[in-house]
């Protein structure tokens, strides 16, 4: 993990340099039109749209190839034969990826590895599910589910995705710039004027000045560094969507999400859905339960689910019965209870039921969080905006009340 973090740090520095160079070039070009100051805003809006568009194209190409593979498996036709026929009807980018997948399969490479090496847009999660499906001989079902889920999740609005990415960083950057300008050119004048009138500055203004003087430089540098790194990474992704460096950064982001309490619970639901689905498929394919659970441990899941499945498989191998081993290993409580009443073929149905339960809970939570993103972001950024506005207007109101007091005439 330390080596991965070190590589990520090097790529992070490269993204900062790329973002700074890109911003400088466009700033110079726009400077000839006397509008060079809008270069940061333009880059923050344009580059993410281009990057997300390229990413969506890569995902759509991967989904197209996965659809061809699913058709070949469902029709029981050799996969290379279908892919070779598909190469004649697809565009250049898809044709090259189809050829790469086909050649790797013809060389004897397993399907999940061939698709992982040729289609960088495929997630580690999908690759893990395909690998498990190959080993338990349930490839048609898994491919059909991956294709159906990919079609449902394919974004239809590029602007919305760009907004989710660009809005927080753009707001942080511009708030930093505005607050810095106010604290350097405006509030010191306030201090001098209030000192001349022997008036105490309002507390809200003093708090802002103290905050900027204490942590302002550090916060400003961090905001600029993050904005440049974001801009550089988006540019790299626009040029080469989901290349090796971006795959590695995606792995780092997955690791960060897995340790943050809110996202950790959400991702855990998805991990349990994948694991329980593989166990159910294994039982339907005739595998013993310990072997089916062992296959689930090879999926790309979080640490908690992975360790729970390993403990469960170990306890079953030691001879413990199914319900107690599930309970003592840390499996979901309801699952352990229902397994106590399951017999024979009903066991696979129990796992299938809980797979649907956790997948539905994950989808529902994801939809709720996406709906809450905009109002939560607006509320979060409204607080500093309100703070800055009060820091400017409250002293003005107090100064006006002192210099020109209202006289009531009877």
Image (spheres, helix red, strand yellow):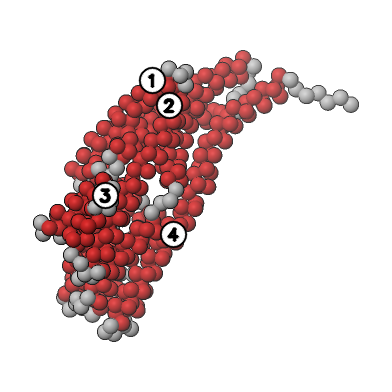
Q: Mark 3 points at which residue?
A: 94
Q: Name the residue under label 2.
A: 39
Q: Quarter of the image holding residue 105? A: bottom left
Mark-to-mark CA distance, 1 and 4: 45 Å
Residue at 39% in and 69% down: 357
Q: Which of marks 1 and 3 is nearer the N terminus?
A: 1
Q: Earlier in the sequence, mark 2 or mark 1?
A: 1
Residue at 35% in and 47% down: 56
Q: Considering only vertical position in the picture, is 409 above or below 320?
A: above
Q: Residue furthest top?
A: 196
Mark-to-mark CA distance, 2 and 4: 37 Å
Q: Is residue 391 visible?
A: yes
Query: Mark 1–mark 3 contact, CB under 8 Å?
Result: no
Q: Which of marks 3 and 4 is in front?
A: 3
Q: Mark 4 points at which residue?
A: 365
Mark-to-mark CA distance, 3 and 4: 34 Å
């Amino acid at each position: 993990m330390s080596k991965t973090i070190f590589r990520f740090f090097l790529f992070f520095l490269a993204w900062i340099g790329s973002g700074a160079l890109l911003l400088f070039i466009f700033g110079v070009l726009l400077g000839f039109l006397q509008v060079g100051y809008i270069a940061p805003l333009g880059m923050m809006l344009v580059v993410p749209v281009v990057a997300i568009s390229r990413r969506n194209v890569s995902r759509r190409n991967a989904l197209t190839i996965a659809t061809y593979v699913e058709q070949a498996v469902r029709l029981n036709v050799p996969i290379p034969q279908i892919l070779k026929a598909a190469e004649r009807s697809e565009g250049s980018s898809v044709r090259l990826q189809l050829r790469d997948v086909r050649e790797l399969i013809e060389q004897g490479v397993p399907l999940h590895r061939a698709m992982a090496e040729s289609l960088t847009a495929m997630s580690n999660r999908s690759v893990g599910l395909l690998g498990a499906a190959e080993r338990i001989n349930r490839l048609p079902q898994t491919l059909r589910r991956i294709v159906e889920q990919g079609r449902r999740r394919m974004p239809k609005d590029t602007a919305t995705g760009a907004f989710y990415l660009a809005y927080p960083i753009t707001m942080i950057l511009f708030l930093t710039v505005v607050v810095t300008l106010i604290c350097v050119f405006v509030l010191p004048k306030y201090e001098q004027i209030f000192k001349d009138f022997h008036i105490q500055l309002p507390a809200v203004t003093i708090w802002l000045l103290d905050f900027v003087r204490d942590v302002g430089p550090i916060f400003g540098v961090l905001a600029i560094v993050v904005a440049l790194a974001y801009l550089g990474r988006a540019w790299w992704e626009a040029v080469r969507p989901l290349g090796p460096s971006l795959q590695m950064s995606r792995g780092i982001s997955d690791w960060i999400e897995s340790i943050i309490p809110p996202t950790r619970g959400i991702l855990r639901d998805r991990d349990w859905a994948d694991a329980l689905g593989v166990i159910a498929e294994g039982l339907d394919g005739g595998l013993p339960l310990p072997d089916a659970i062992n296959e689930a441990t090879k999926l790309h899941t979080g640490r908690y689910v992975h360790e729970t499945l390993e403990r469960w498989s170990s306890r079953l191998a030691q001879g413990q019965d199914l319900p107690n081993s599930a309970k003592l290993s840390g499996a979901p409580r309801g699952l352990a209870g229902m397994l106590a009443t399951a017999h024979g073929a009903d066991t696979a149905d129990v796992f299938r039921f809980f797979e649907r339960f956790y997948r539905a809970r994950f989808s529902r939570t994801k939809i709720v969080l996406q709906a809450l993103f905009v109002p939560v972001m607006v509320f979060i950024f409204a607080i500093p905006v309100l703070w800055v506005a009060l820091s400017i207007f409250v002293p003005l109101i107090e100064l006006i009340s002192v210099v020109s007091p209202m006289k009531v005439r009877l």
